[in-house]
Image (cartoon, rainbow, N blue to C red):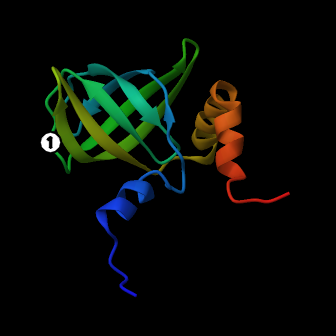
Amino acid sequence: MSSHKTDENAATDSDQRYFPRWEVKNAVSYQLDKTKETYEGYTQDLSCAGACITSDTKFAPNQKIKLTVYLSPKTTVNLNGNILWAKKEGKENQIGVSFYNTGEETQELILQHAFNLHKEKFLKHLFDGWKE
């Protein structure tokens, strides 16, 4: 049996991330590395390990980015990330960001926010594959 992944398997593997992403549309402000200008956008999805961000800004992969994600009007988290991919989606630009040096407190805030928004999905993911 071959150890190569087929396109069919690759599609399902992308949904089996260790840290699941939740579809949320949170406001984001950010700065690209070595720039002082602040831009705005929003999340398409978010996890403790990364996010998909949509904005009017044109991005390039392999840039560092500093983000402030508004989990609610009163709760924000500051994150450092690397842009893994960038693409044009309609009139908007999207990027895949992998976070690094994310503290436990920040990870817990993101998880708590996701849990409160999507309790059933969150629990299903945690216990996927468990049998009674």
Q: Position of residue 40 (x, y in %)?
A: 29, 19
Quadrant showing the C terminus? bottom right
Taking the view exactly as shown, the residue that stands out farthest to the bottom is 1
The percent position of residue 36, horizontal first and vertical second, equals 21, 27
Q: What percent of the width, then of the height, locates residue 15?
A: 46, 51
**Does the image show residue 56?**
yes
Question: Residue at horizontal 47%, vertical 48%?
Answer: 49
Label 1 secondary element: loop
Q: Residue at image x 44%, y 33%? A: 45
Q: Dot 1: few (<14), some (14–19), or many (≥20) neighbours within 10 Å? A: few
Left/right placement of residue 99 relative to residue 107 reads left
Regarding residue 34, the answer to whether it shows in the image is no
Counting labels gives 1
Q: Mark 1 belongs to which amino acid? A: Ala
* Residue at (58% x, 39% y) in the render: 106
Residue drawn at the location 43% of the way across and 59% of the way down: 13
Which residue matches tag 1?
60
Image side of residue 93 versus residue 102, left or right: left
In this rendered view, identify the residue nearer to me: 45 or 34: 45
Quadrant, the N terminus: bottom left
Residue 96, image x, y percentages: 31, 42
- Dividing the picture into quadrants, the one containing residue 117 is top right
In the depicted view, which residue is nearer to us: 44 or 10?
10
Q: Is residue 4 above or below residue 84?
A: below
Q: Which residue occupies the extreme right position in the image?
A: 132
Q: Is residue 43 left or right of residue 19?
A: left
Residue 71 against residue 16 in the figure, above or below: above
Task: Pick whichever, 61 or 131, lies toward us.
Answer: 131
